[in-house]
Amino acid sequence: MARFGMALDYKNCINCKACESACKEENGIMMGADKHRIWVGVGEIEGQYPLLDLTSNVFHPSQCQQCDDAPCQDVCPTEATYTDENGIVRVDVEKCILCTYCMNACPYDARYVEENTMTVDKCNFCTDTRLDRGETTTACQATCPTKVRIFGDLDDPNSEISEVLRVREHYSLKTHLGTNPKLFYLT
Amino acid sequence: MGVEISRRKFLQGTVAMSVVGATAATNLLSNEQTPSVKPGVVSFHPTKTKDVESHDVATLCEMCVNKCAALARVENGVITKLNPNPLFPKSKNMLCPRGNAGIQSVYDPDRLKYPMIRIGEKGEGKFKRVTWDEAYEAILNGTDKFPGLQKILDEEEDNRSSMLFCAGEGMAEHTFKQFYQGFGSSNWLNHASICLQTVASGYGVTIGAYPQADLDNAEYIIMAGANRAEAIVTPDTMDLFKRTKGRGAKLICIDPRFTNTAAKADKWLAIKPGTDLAFVLALTYVTITEELENSAYIEANFNGYELYKNSVLENKYTPEWAEPITGIKAKDIYTIAREFAAAAPKAVYYPGRRSTFAKNDFQLRRAMAIFQSMHGAIDNKGGLIFGGKLPLREHDGLMPLYDRAQARAVYKSAEMKGKLGYDDCAVVSGGGSWISWRNRYLQDQVDYNIRGMFCYKHNPMMNMPNTAKTAEMLKKMELVVTIDTMPSDTVMYADVVLPECTYLERTDPVKTFGGVEPSFAVRNKVIDPMYETKPVIEILKGLTTKISKPLFEISKKYDEELQEFIEEDGEEAAYAEFDLTLPFIHTQEELNHHALAMYIGAAEKLHTDGIFYPKQEDYYKKLSANDYQYYPEKKKKYSVNGGKPKTPSGKVECIIGSFTAKGIDAFPIWRDEYEFKVPEGKFKLLTGRHAQFTQSGTANNSMLRDLMPENFIWINRRVAEQKGIAFADMVEVSSSIGSTQLKAYPTEKIAPDQVFFIHGFGEESEELTWAYKNGGNDNKIIEDHIEPVYGAAAMHETNVEIRKV
C-alpha cells in the first residue's frame, strides 16, 4: 500500500523527448504522434526576431496527473478505469469498451486510444512494466538526462518526494476543478 | 615532426609533410529471428512484456558518439528495454531518446543481414546474397562486374596505396585502422575533417589539448555556436541544464537561431553567422583595456602575449567595431566581458564540439582559447579542464607495413616539385581532409592510380558536402567494399557488402574515458549477432585470412627488398612481417583482458557492470533515485597540470610563427572577407543537430522517426508570408551545386536572411523503408568550401534560393 505521486523539476526540461521514447519502448505503445502517455508542452515563441521573449518558449513536461478524484474514473460506465491500492489510476483492458467518455472528461487531455490493446489508455506509472518487477522508478524518470522527475510514495514521510514537497515550492494543474492531482511542478 | 620517406621506393605514395604545432591531445579520432517482412504501415518492434524472466547486460550506446552506459534488459533472447546504467560518471544515469531507440536498430527489418556482391550496375543497388567466403573471394579475385585486389595490386605493381581506407567514428575504428596499417596504404580518411578537426586542433595548438568544460561548477557560461539542449553531449548537457535559469550558472547563448539552448539561457544574442571571431576579439579588447585579465597568470603562462595584445589594441577591436559586424550590441559585449571576468576562474567560454561552419573557424577557436586563458580559467574547477585519464595497456598491433603508411592522404606542392600540387590546406592531420581528397581524386590530381576503397561504418554519400561529387567518386572506384549495419546510400555503390552486427550484438575494445571523474567502460555483447552478421574484428579476421598470402605473393613479385629478405632469412620469416591476420587472431574479450591486465579484477567487473575505476567500491554512492556520487569531491580531477596549459612549451601559444610561411595568420585577426554577406534574394544555409536524431546513421530508426517524422526548413515567418509559404508547404532549396525539397516551418526563431534544416535526412537508398526520400538532404546543396588550415569542410558558407513547389 502506497500513494504514489510525482514531482517535476520542470525547469530542467530541455524537451529532448527521452521520456517519450522510454515510455513508448517500456510500455509498447503504438507509433504515431497521437499515441502517447507522456509529452512535453512547448510555449509558442513570442516576439519578432531578434527580440524574442526567452520566457515564452517554456518546456512543460506532462502526463496523467493521477488525480485522487479522477473525472475519467467517475464517467467510466464499465469501471474499466479504477484506482489501485497504490493510488494509481489504471485501466482494465478487459473492461474498456472504447466509449471514450474518459477522454472527454479528463481536463488534462491525458488519455488516448491504444490500438495494441484497444483501450483508452493512459500513464500508469509503469506499474505493470516496472513496479511489478520490483523497480522503483518509472521509465521516464530513470532515463531523463536532466532528472526532471522524482517518483515516490506520498504517504511515506521519508520518501524523496515527500521531502522535496516539504522544502520546495510547487503547484499542481487545474486544482480549482477539485481533481486533487498527484503530480507536482516544482518552481 | 618529420616522417621518414618510405624504404619501399617503388610504391607510389606520399611524402610526409611536417605538421605545424602540436595536435590535440585528446583522443578525438580518438536467420530469421525477427520478422523479415517490412511492416507496411507504422509499427515498431514491440517490447512490452510481463512475467518473463529477464536479465540485464551492461553495454554502451552507439546511437551517437557519446558512448553512454546502458543496461539492456533481455527476455527470451530479445532485448526489450534499454535503461541507463547509473555506474558511469560520464553519462550520469541517463539515456537520451536515441539511446532508448537503440533497440530499433537491432530489430530494424531493413538492416544488412548477409554478405552481398553487386550484380547490377554501380550504384543501382542490385546485389546477390553470398556466403562470407564467396564475399572474401570476390574481394580478392573480383567478378565479371569488378576487379579484385589481386588484379589491382598486380597491375599497380604492389602499390598498396591504390586502395583508400575510410572509417566513421566508433569504438572499433582502431580495429579497422589496424587493417589499413597492415595493408600498407597511405590513404586514410576519417570523420575528423567533416567533424571537429578545427575546434580540437585550435585548442590543441593553443593550450595543448582539446579541453572539457566543468559545467557542474562554472558560474558563468558563454555558449556560442553550440547547442547542448539539442546536440546532447554527456556529461555537459546534464550538468548545465540542472543549473540554468537562476539556479547557479548564468548562461549566455550566442546563436543565429533561437534554439532550445537559447530557451534555457539568461540571455540570447542573435549573431550573424561566421562572425563569432569578431565577438571574441571585442571581448578580448574590453578585457585588455579595462584590465580585467589575470595578469599574473598571463605573465607566468603565456608566449607571445604582447604581440597579440598589441594587435587587438592597434586594430581597435572595440565593441563598437564589432557591433555592425556581429549584430550584437556593443553594450552587451561590454557587459559580458565584465561579467565573465567577475566570475572567472569559474567561467567558461564553451569550446563546443561540432563541424567547421565558417572558414575562419580555426582562428575563432584560437581566439576563444586565448580569451579563456587570459582569465587563468584553465585546468581549474569551474573552468576548462583537462581531467585525468586511466592508462590502458597497448596491444602489440601490426607495425605499419610500410613507413609510408603513416604519411597523409594529402600533400602539398612544396613537397612535390614538378607535380600537380595540392594547396588546399596548410596542415594535414591524421584523419586527412575528406573533401579535398575526394575532389583531387576526381580531378586526377593524384599521381598514381587509386582504384578502390574499404569503407567502414561511414556514409560519405550523406556525411559530406556535395553529394553529387561523392557519387562520382564512388562510381569511379573500381572496387568498393563496405562494412556496415545498414543499406545506406553509400552501401548502394558497393561491389562487396560485408554486414556488421549492431552495437548490441558485439563486444568492442575497452575504452578509457578521461575527465573530472575518469573511468573505463566497455561495450559488452547483449545478444548473439542476428542473421549472418559479425563484429568487424571477425570480419577482418576472415578477410585477412583470405587475402594475406596472395598479397604477399604479389609483393614477392615486385619488391626487390623482400626478395633479398627471403634469400637471406627464408620465406617464413619474411611472411611473418607481411601476415595481415595477426591483429585479428585474438577475440575482443581476450584483447580487453590484456589491455586491463594492470588492474586486478577490472576485466571481470567490466564484464558484469560495464564500468570500472580504481576505488570504485569506496567512492561510488547512490545519493538519491536520480543522483549518484562517483568520486568524492577531493578526488575529482579538476586540476591535473597545476593550472597550466599542456603545450610542449608549457605556455599558452598566442603566436604560431610557422603558420605564416603557409599563408595562415600566426594569431587571430579579423579579415574583411569574414564578414557576413548574403546576396539580395538569397539565404545563408545553416545546418545542425537535435536530440531525436543523430545523423544519417539514425535516419531509418522507426522510434526516432516517430518523434521526428521529417526535417523542416526554418524560414523567417515574415519572409515566408511575403513569399506565400505556409507551414508544411513543400519548398525547393537550391544552391550552385544542386537542390533538395522539404517542407517549410515559418518561424521567428531565425533571421530573415537565413534558413536552417537538420542534417541527415533525405537518403535515397530504396532499401531504407523509413529514410528513403524522407525530408531534405543538406549535403546535396552545401557547396564544398574548404577551410584553409586543416582542409575541413566549411558547412555554413553556402547561399541558397527558395521556391515554393
Image: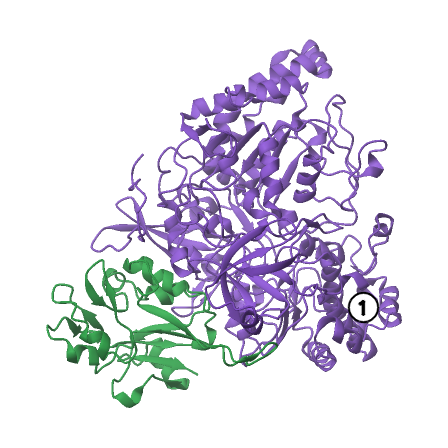
Chain colours: A green, B purple
How far across and how far down the image is residue B391, in percent?
A: 59, 48
Query: At 42% from the left edge and 44% from the top edge, which residue is drawn?
Result: B768
Asked if residue B354 shows in the view, the reply is yes
Q: Is residue B454 above or below residue A129?
A: above
Percent x, y for residue A93?
Answer: 16, 64
Image location of residue B750, percent across then percent down: 58, 70
Give the secondary structure at mark 1. helix
**Residue placed most toward the observer, A121 or B542:** A121
Question: Crowding near pointer 1: few (<14 within 10 Å), some, many (20+)?
Answer: some
Instruction: Give the total of numbered labels.
Output: 1
User: Quick one: quadrant of the N terminus of chain B?
Assistant: top right
Q: Is residue B227 left or right of residue B525?
A: right
The residue shown at (67%, 65%) is B273
Kindly indicate the quadrant of the structure image that contains residue A167.
Answer: bottom left
Q: Quadrant of residue B759?
A: bottom right
| In-front residue for pair B166/B88 | B166
Residue lying at the far bottom of the rendered structure: A176
Task: Please tell me which residue is depicted at 29% across the width and 73% down the height of the picture.
Answer: A110
Asked whether, in this view, residue B112 is left or right of residue B273, the answer is left
